């Protein structure tokens, strides 16, 4: 197996640090050198331990994640592999992170096991059973969305299933469309299925309620983090569509970036 993979975690959220520390430390070949919520402290930790991987959010105290990446390039001849975890999903932010050498960007909230998988990928420690085949990369966007909706427990026979799938596909292809749900997104989906915007909105709402009330809780937790509870209520249509679309969009960006580096 070789030497341990040394990891530094920089995130201002204490709970996130604890979850990542516990999950990563449970891997026999991983060693967490430290977790910090401060950009300056993270820089010192990296200089001291020379980690293989830096897992970081942009939201850090003293100086933010972008400043930390700038400082790293000034003081380190060999940069660690960089894995970004962030709730911010904007084209400019993604491009900036990749320009600084980020290998992966994972949207928050995330499943900690996904981070383990990404660390193994960027350090070439991916077990054979966990590697993805070329066929998986070449799947159509529609089939990817279909799998996600089925996994979270939305029955395929519901009208809202096909409306949601189409809405998510449209949003992945044009992230700005989510800002015009009533005027653009619903009418576009309605035209595709010879319906109307009001019915599309209603049936999407019904499908989301089915998922939230009777769906796969574990799958929902992976997508929505710790918000799957009766106390917090269901996400709006736009929140539900945007979160899934953002996840797929980031996965696509990751694949494009990885392919560009090979």
Image (spheres, helix red, strand yellow):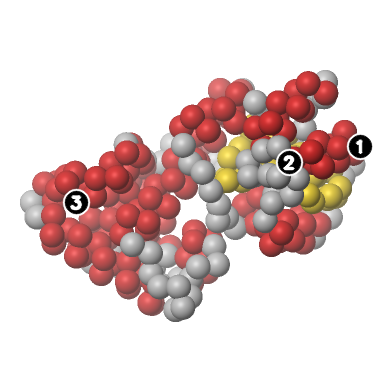
- Total numbered badges shown on the rendered structure: 3
Residue toward you, 130 or 246: 246
Whichever of labels 2 and 1 marks the residue nearer the N terminus, that label is 1
Q: Is residue 157 visible?
A: no
Mark 2 against mark 1, which lies toward the viewer?
2
Outermost residue, front direction? 62
Q: Residue at 42%, 65% (x, y): give it.
A: 152
Res. 62 mark: 2
Quadrant in which the C terminus is drawn: top right
Mark 3 and mark 1 in contact? Answer it, CB < 8 Å. Answer: no
Corner quadrant of residue 27:
bottom right
The relative height of residue 64 versus residue 31 in the rendered view (above or below) is: above
Give neighbour class at mark 1: few <14, some 14-19, many 20+ (Cα, 10 Å): few
**Residue displayed at 71% across by 59% down:** 14
Residue mark closest to the camera, 3 vs 2: 2
Vertical placement of residue 101 versus 230, above or below: above
Can residue 152 be seen by looking at this rendering? Answer: yes
The numbered mark, 3 or 2, whose residue comes first in the sequence reads 2
Residue 241 placed where, x, y %?
35, 53
Q: Are circles 2 and 1 on residues that touch, CB within 8 Å?
A: no
Q: Which mark is residue 182?
A: 3
Q: Position of residue 60 (x, y in %)?
A: 68, 44
Residue 1 lies left or right of residue 172; in this view the side is right
Q: Nearer the viewer, residue 129 or 206?
A: 206
**Residue 235: numbered disc:** none
Residue marked by disc 1: 48
């Amino acid at each position: 197996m070789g030497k341990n993979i040394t990891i530094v975690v920089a995130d201002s959220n204490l709970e996130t640090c604890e979850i990542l520390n516990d999950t990563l430390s449970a891997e026999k070949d991983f060693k967490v050198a430290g977790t910090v919520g401060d950009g300056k402290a993270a820089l010192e930790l990296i200089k001291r331990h020379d980690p293989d991987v830096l897992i970081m959010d942009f939201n850090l105290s003293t100086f933010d994640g972008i400043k930390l990446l700038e400082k790293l390039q000034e003081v380190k001849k060999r940069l660690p592999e960089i894995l970004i975890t962030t709730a911010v999903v904007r084209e400019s932010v993604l491009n900036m992170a990749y320009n600084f050498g980020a290998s992966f960007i994972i949207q928050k909230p995330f499943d900690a096991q996904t981070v383990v998988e990404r660390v193994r990928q960027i350090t070439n420690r991916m077990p054979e059973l966990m590697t993805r085949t070329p066929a998986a990369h070449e799947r159509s966007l529609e089939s990817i969305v279909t799998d996600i909706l089925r996994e979270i427990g939305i029955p395929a026979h519901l009208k809202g299933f096909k409306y949601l799938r189409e809405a998510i596909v449209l949003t992945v292809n044009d992230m700005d469309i989510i800002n015009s749900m009533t005027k653009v997104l619903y009418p576009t989906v309605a035209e595709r299925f010879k319906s109307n915007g009001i019915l599309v909105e209603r049936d999407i709402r019904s499908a989301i309620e089915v998922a939230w009330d009777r769906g796969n809780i574990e799958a929902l937790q992976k997508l929505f983090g710790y918000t799957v509870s009766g106390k917090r209520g269901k996400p709006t249509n736009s929140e539900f569509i945007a979160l899934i679309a953002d996840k797929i969009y980031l996965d696509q960006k990751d694949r494009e970036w990885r392919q560009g580096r090979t």
